[in-house]
Amino acid sequence: MAPFPEERMRRLRRAPWLRDLVRETTLSPADLVWPLFAVHGQGVRQEIPQMPGQHHLSVDALVKEAVEAQALGIRAVILFGIPAAKDPLGTEAWADDGIVQRAVRLLRREAPDLGVMTDVCLCEYTDHGHCGKVVDGEVDNDATLELLGRVALSHARAGADLVAPSDMMDGRVRFLREALDRHDFQQVGILAYSAKHASSFYGPFREAAHSSPRFGDRRTYQMDAGNRREAMRELALDAGEGADILMVKPALPCLDILREARDRFEHPLAAYQVSGEYALIRAAAERGWVDGDAMMLESLTAIRRAGADFVLTYFARDAARSLARR
Ligand code: PBG
């Protein structure tokens, strides 16, 4: 290749149409999944202080917002629930009339073409805030699988398309796959939070879900943030256990892991741009320190460029609106 002055990289940057033609990474509303927080009640739409622009929504309000997002090109949502009451096992997580189950049923009825994913975990539902059953002060892996199986089945019964285990117990993908198949839910897919790091970036979510652990932390089950090779092992295990889609979380702090996962696995790959990533951009934008809209789109593009096929992001609706204006 001829060096400068024959080669000039700026030639293809001269005009918007040229830049559009040679853009390698695209971003569209169909690449985005919107996480929503369901709460009990009627007509509830309460802003989450640490996540401005995101709300606790009763199921009626949740359906309204989801339908609005769908009109903007968003194809799927993922649901989290705030239970009426918490207890040691997190029993509302698998209750037939639990908050997520009710939201799924209503979405199915009111927005049949919208993809519905559900987060499968216990931490929003347990009074101790851990993602599993606590035995002798520790989260018991195998006892937790049993409970997660109940959660996933109750979501499938309500009509969820994909269940997304975020607990990081060993063996849960196979356990859930077998439980779903045994109950004739062969068509319900598993979006596995495969490489999920123990991250400070989940802070705002835990405020929103009142799910901070009461004792200890999540480092005995979520991954150490310094580990890349271990992330590859986690991804390979979930792929082998029957995950349909693999996920890396958080997103911007893990672009290297996303890239390597993209290169190694043929599975569809998702990334979760988590609450802390959202809060950083929103907070700086509110102060007028950054252009929040541009930063939102740039961060999502970077996550896609690193290898994510789609992104779970609190920006989903805002990004869809912004993309429609361009
Ligand atoms: C449940 C769960 C969490 C998130 C998704 N599922 C919290 C956690 O693991 O502490 C975090 C999402 C976010 O920060 O946006 N285990």
Image (tube, grey):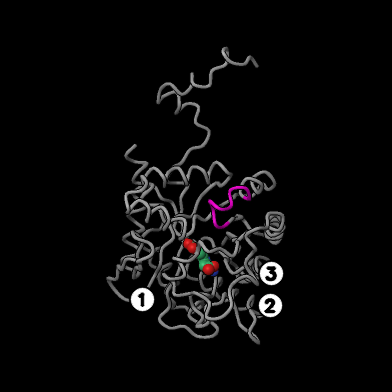
- Kindly identify the residue that appears in the image at 40 percent across and 81 percent down: 84
Which quadrant would residue 215 be assigned to in this image? bottom right
**Disc 3 target residue:** 170
Instruction: Identify the disc placed on residue 211.
Output: none
Of pointers 2 and 3, the one earlier in the residue sequence: 2
Secondary structure, mark 1, is loop
Query: Given contact means CB atoms under 8 Å apart, are the residues at marks 1 and 2 in contact?
Result: no
- Kindly identify the residue that appears in the image at 45 percent across and 27 percent down: 19
CA–CA distance between discs 2 and 3?
A: 8 Å
Instruction: Locate residue 38 relative to residue 258 in the image: left or right.
Output: left
Residue 176 location (% of width, % of height): 63, 69
Of pointers 3 and 1, the one earlier in the residue sequence: 1
The magenta-colored residue range is: 249-257
Instruction: Identify the disc placed on residue 40.
Output: 1
Which residue is most to the left? Answer: 43
User: Of helix, strand and loop, which mostly describes the magenta segment?
Assistant: helix
**Disc 2 target residue:** 142
Residue 250 location (% of width, % of height): 54, 57
Secondary structure, mark 2, is helix
Instruction: Locate residue 259 relative to residue 118 in the image: left or right.
Output: right
Which quadrant would residue 169 be assigned to in this image? bottom right
- Kindly identify the residue that appears in the image at 45 percent across and 54 percent down: 313
Of pointers 1 and 2, the one earlier in the residue sequence: 1
Crowding near the residue tagged with mark 2, few <14, some 14–19, many ≥20 C-alpha atoms within 10 Å? some
